[in-house]
């Protein structure tokens, strides 16, 4: 990174919780890389008409453990909401998540940096939701959908934009993964998708306090890829600004073969998801 610029990075980490059953039904949580496709599904996680969700008590307990380990407040009230978007591996056409009233909020994590110093990174929120199914895209253009993962308890941990380099993002991810493993709520196996990290990246001139347009680098499946993708995206955005262009708010993917980020789709804002309180969960 050139000395005239600094990165502004916030992290979103999605951790599947190690419960025996799914978030809102009694289906067994299975290894999506080993079990027969669509073998651990029921009318609830298939999103069939007339079914009702029931909250997994153990998932709530695990999520509160994580919140306390991250020095968060655990509010007396938390509320589930419907997050509407349409994608083939989301059978209901919406995801049960949390928005205005998350399970945990206003925490922090201390990370160790390569120079021996420690830095405190704010945790904005940690909220419960259900995972989506899994899409497999074949070379002939066919897409296969496996809904075994749909409905698995998922904890999304959102940091404040306090990270300033790819090295800090890597240190944050390693520390958070270690905490989740120590608590026994997640295996930390990123290769199987049970822990997925996403980096929200923007850059600004050093000394400037404004937040510029950010991109979200999605579904990074290793800490090494997180570091490389973040480093590349920082350099790409600096080049865009220095050439007189503007960064577009969009979702990026990491092309490991070409070692570069690639645009996937325009990035939604919160109002695009049409959040409203989940009427079936008190």
Image (cartoon, rainbow, N blue to C red):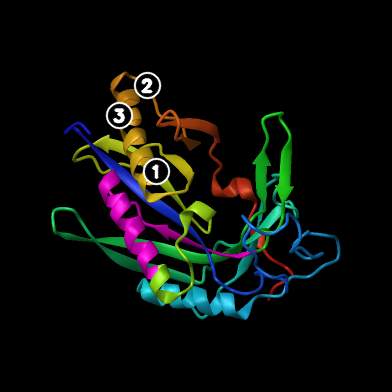
Task: Name the secondary structure under disc 1.
Answer: helix
Task: Name the secondary structure under disc 2.
Answer: loop
Q: Which residue is mark 1?
A: 225
Residue 39 percent coordinates (x, y): 76, 61
Instruction: Please tell me which of labels 2 and 1 falls first in the chain.
Output: 1
Q: Mark 3 and 1 residues: CB-CB less than 8 Å, in contact?
A: no
Left or right placement of residue 261 versus residue 40 in this view? left
User: Where the N terminus falls, by quadrant?
Assistant: top left
Left or right placement of residue 75 versus residue 143 in this view? left
In the displayed structure, 24 sits above or below 238; it is below
Q: How far apart, in angstroms, are the residues tagged by discs 3 and 2?
A: 10 Å
In the displayed structure, 189 sits above or below 250; it is below
Q: Which residue is mark 3?
A: 238
Q: Nearer the viewer, residue 33 or 176?
A: 33
Q: Residues within 10 Å of mark 1 (few under 14, many from 20)?
A: some
> What's drawn in magenta, residue-wise?
152-179
Query: Can the viewer see residue 73?
Result: no
The numbered dot on residue 109 is: none
Q: Which residue is mark 2?
A: 245
Residue 119 percent coordinates (x, y): 21, 60
Q: Nearer the viewer, mark 3 or mark 1?
A: 1
What residue do we see at 53% from left, 39% from top? 267
């Amino acid at each position: 990174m050139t000395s005239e610029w600094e990165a502004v990075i916030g992290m979103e980490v999605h951790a599947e919780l190690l419960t025996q059953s799914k978030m809102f039904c009694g289906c067994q949580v299975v290894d999506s890389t080993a079990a027969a496709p669509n073998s651990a599904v029921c009318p609830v996680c298939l999103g069939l008409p007339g079914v009702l969700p029931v909250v997994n008590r153990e998932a709530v307990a695990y999520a509160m453990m994580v919140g306390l380990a991250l020095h968060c407040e655990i509010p007396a009230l938390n509320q589930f909401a419907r997050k509407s978007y349409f994608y083939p591996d989301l059978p209901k056409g919406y995801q049960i998540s949390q928005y205005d009233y998350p399970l945990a909020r206003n925490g922090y994590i201390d990370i160790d940096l390569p120079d021996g110093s420690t830095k405190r990174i704010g945790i904005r929120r940690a909220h419960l939701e259900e995972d989506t199914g899994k899409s497999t895209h074949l070379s002939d253009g066919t897409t296969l959908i496996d809904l075994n993962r749909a409905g698995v308890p998922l904890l999304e941990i959102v940091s404040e934009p306090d990270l300033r380099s790819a090295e800090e993002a890597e240190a944050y991810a390693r520390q958070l993964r270690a905490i989740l493993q120590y608590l026994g709520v997640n295996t930390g196996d990123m290769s199987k998708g049970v822990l997925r990290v996403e980096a929200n990246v923007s850059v600004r001139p050093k000394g400037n306090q404004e937040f510029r347009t950010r991109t979200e680098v999605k579904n990074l499946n290793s800490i090494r890829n997180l570091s490389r993708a973040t480093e590349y995206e920082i350099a790409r955005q600096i080049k865009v600004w220095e050439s007189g262009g503007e960064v577009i708010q969009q979702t990026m993917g990491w092309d490991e073969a070409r070692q570069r980020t690639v645009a996937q789709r325009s990035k939604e804002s919160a109002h695009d998801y049409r959040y409203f309180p989940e009427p079936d969960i008190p």
